[in-house]
Amino acid sequence: MANAKPKNPYYQGPVTDHFDGTRFFNPGGIAPLGFRAMLRWQFNGERQTWQKQVPSPFPQAKPDARVEGDGLRVTMVGHASMLVQVAGLNILTDPVWSDRVSPFSFAGLKRVTAPGIRFEDLPKIDLVLVSHNHYDHLDVATLKRLQATHGPHFVTPLGNDTIIRRAAPDAKISVMDWGDRITVSDGITIDAEPARHWSARGTGDRSMALWASFVISTPSGKIYHVGDTGFHDGINYRAAGEKHGPFRLAILPFGAYEPRWFMKGQHQNPDEAVRGMQLANAAYTAGHHFATFQLTDEAMDAPVKALEVALREHGVARERFRPLRAGEVFDVPLG
């Protein structure tokens, strides 16, 4: 039938305020623009040239086995991939060790900076957070490798478990909707909260798996991890701050934002990231989503330059918002 409703290959469930029975959506938000707008962007002639290979100013890190006590340490792998060590737990966010973020191993966006930790140098990984299914956040080759080597607990929003399960059939996976909470261990919980984004692995599955941010509550403080989001007047930051804040650390994207007419609904810029940090009541921020894969038009160094301006304009000390480069280690102060 020509008007047959498309089948969701990832998730079947009841209609909610952000799921229409087939696709997820951002209530009151901005839907991603369509194919014609994408072509307009791709042929706008404004894409800046990145070098094909850019060494990080930091050497590849060799993390300690665990961080105990009041310690909270973040080591940048690249893009949105970080090792978070807190309360004796080793957590990876949106892990990608592949050279390309693409449906193909031979084509597509290629990494310009090597991972900040060699895969072989990872400590025992306990928990893996996957925020959504875009290729720069859900890399099945890496997840399969992590399952084989570490057997971690995977946590992801609705529908993404179907993709992960194909790569790692025996994986332990917790699937979360916005507003859900799971207990990881004594004193450590994870909440899934809204983000202003979308999802797709191909041309026919747009927004059929959910996207989310995560709040990790530990005896050493709370962490707010956002993989991708549009700012949308700070609505989600304000809600997260009121419900869960204050945060010892926010992990926030601040790159991949040009052109604004195309990206604004789903990717915040540096000024919005700083405002989000303040609205969420985060003491410190680890900035990501820059200097690894060229997703958008801006120059490689543009996000950091714009961040410096935003920090000055909003009266935030530079040491409180750290744009982390591959291999960089950030020991987050307590209090």
Image: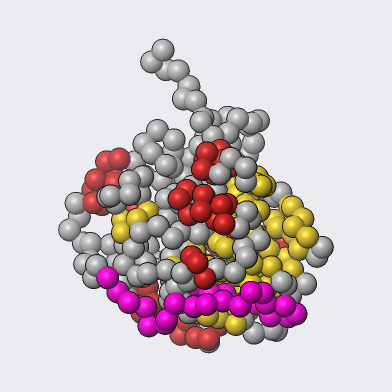
Q: Nearer the viewer, residue 191 or 118?
A: 118
**Residue 207: percent from the left, percent from the top?**
48, 40
Identify the residue at horizontal 62%, vertical 81% (top origin).
332
Residue 150 spot, x, y in % from top left:
60, 58
Judge left or right: residue 198 versus residue 159.
left
Asked whether residue 156 is in view, the answer is yes
Q: Residue at x 57, y 63 (%)?
A: 92
Can you give x and y, in whole percent of width and height, for residue 96 in the image?
45, 59
Colour approach in the figure: secondary structure
Using the rendered image of the protein, determine whether residue 273 is visible from the camera's viewpoint.
no
Q: Residue at x 62, y 65 (%)?
A: 124
Q: Is residue 238 left or right of residue 81?
A: right
Residue 58: in magenta span? yes
Q: What are the residue bounds of the magenta stretch?
A: 53-76
- Residue at x-position 31% and y-position 59%: 110
- Magenta stretch encompasses residue 208: no
45 in relation to 66, above or below: above
In the displayed structure, 43 sits above or below 92; it is above
